Image (cartoon, helix red, strand yellow):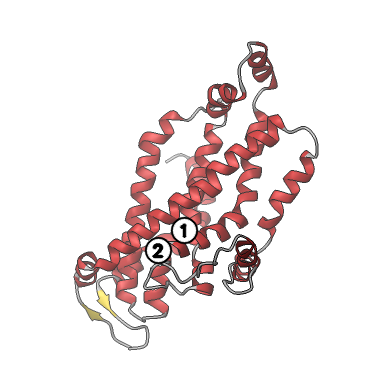
């Protein structure tokens, strides 16, 4: 090994050691815990093998949690990926007046915490005296119990996260939009290309690298953001109707004190994330345009 290689390893070692200590070691510990039954109080753990996994895979709860997770992801992709994509195109290329105001107004909710956003939307969705119930009352419509109805609760929680995260994703996409060469757009307009053709033929390919990043963080981080509003407003209810793969891990560990099943759910979640990353790298990345 050359001297330069040794020096490179010496510089890399501190970061690699921290990465191994705080990433891979907890990961291995979680896999280890998934083969035990433990309540985090007892001094001993009971080895149960793959029993935690077999019970979860045989239960109807897992299917419901997976369906909830898919629904969460689908709604959040609309609110925090599709809409920011379209809005960034409008602000970047179609709107020329009050542009700074619109950007600031749309980004402002991102400065608030999810806890504050959850409390705010708890008031907005109040079926008795909330602003939304008052507006619906003008049309002789009764406000539903947003956080008490299955599937409707998922939409309500997604609007909290969408309102909070929308501005951040918008700014990222907007940076990609304004980086598209103006000459290409002006040339397309000279050829009488419509805004839709410009968006489809120029904007989509030129901003695809940023789009795949926003798409990924919307899926990966979006499910983690769900934890706060679900824990504050519904605790997974009604009947696990608002729970997902991320919240169920917390629930089994710190509410049910079934650490083994919580670790098993964490392993299943990790497998789902790996499957998503495989599909992204295998199929989606092939359609991404990188300038360099």
Which quadrant holds residue 24?
Answer: bottom left
Left-right relation of 46 to 283: left
Quadrant location of the N terminus? Answer: top left
Picture quarter containing residue 131? bottom right
Residue 38 picture location, percent across and down: 30, 81
Q: Could you say which quadrant of the image residue 188 lies in?
A: top right
> Label 1 belongs to which residue?
223
Is 152 in front, or is 24?
A: 152
Q: Secondary structure at mark 1?
A: helix
For marks 1 and 2, the one nearer the N-term is 1
Residue at screen point 34% across, 63% down: 65
| Picture residue at 49% right of the left edge, 61% below the top | 224
Residue pictured at 66% horizontal, 22% vertical: 181
Residue at 19% across, 72% down: 51
Mark 2 secondary-structure assignment = loop
Does residue 225 appear in this view? no
Residue tagged 2: 244
Q: Is residue 197 visible?
A: yes
Q: Position of residue 55 (x, y in %)?
A: 21, 70
Residue 240 rendering spot, x and y as whole percentages:
37, 70
Tell whether 274 sits left or right of 13. left
């Amino acid at each position: 090994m050359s001297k330069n290689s040794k020096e490179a390893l010496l510089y890399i070692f501190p970061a690699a050691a921290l990465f191994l200590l705080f990433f891979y070691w907890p990961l291995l510990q979680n896999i280890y815990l998934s083969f035990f039954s433990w309540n985090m109080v007892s001094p001993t753990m009971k080895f149960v093998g793959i029993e935690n996994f077999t019970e979860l895979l045989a239960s109807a709860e897992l299917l419901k949690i997976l369906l909830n997770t898919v629904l969460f992801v689908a709604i959040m992709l609309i609110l925090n990926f599709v809409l920011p994509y379209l809005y960034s195109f409008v602000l970047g290329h179609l709107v020329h007046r009050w542009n700074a105001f619109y950007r600031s107004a749309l980004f402002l909710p991102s400065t608030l915490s999810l806890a504050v956003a959850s409390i705010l939307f708890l008031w907005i969705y109040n079926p008795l005296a909330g602003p939304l119930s008052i507006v619906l009352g003008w049309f002789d419509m009764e406000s539903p119990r947003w956080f008490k109805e299955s599937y409707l609760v998922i939409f309500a929680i997604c609007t909290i996260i969408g309102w909070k995260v929308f501005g951040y994703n918008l700014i990222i996409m907007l940076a990609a939009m304004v980086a598209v060469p103006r000459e290409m757009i002006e040339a397309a307009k000279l050829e009488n290309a419509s805004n839709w053709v410009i968006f489809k033929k120029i904007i989509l390919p030129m901003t695809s690298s940023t789009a795949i990043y926003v798409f990924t963080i919307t899926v990966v981080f979006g499910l983690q953001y769900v934890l706060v509003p679900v824990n504050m407003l519904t605790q997974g209810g009604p009947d696990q109707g608002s729970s997902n793969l991320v919240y169920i891990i917390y629930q089994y560990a710190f509410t049910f004190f079934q650490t083994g099943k919580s670790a098993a759910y964490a392993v299943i979640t990790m497998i789902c994330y790996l499957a998503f990353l495989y599909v992204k790298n295998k199929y989606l990345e092939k359609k991404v345009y990188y300038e360099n």
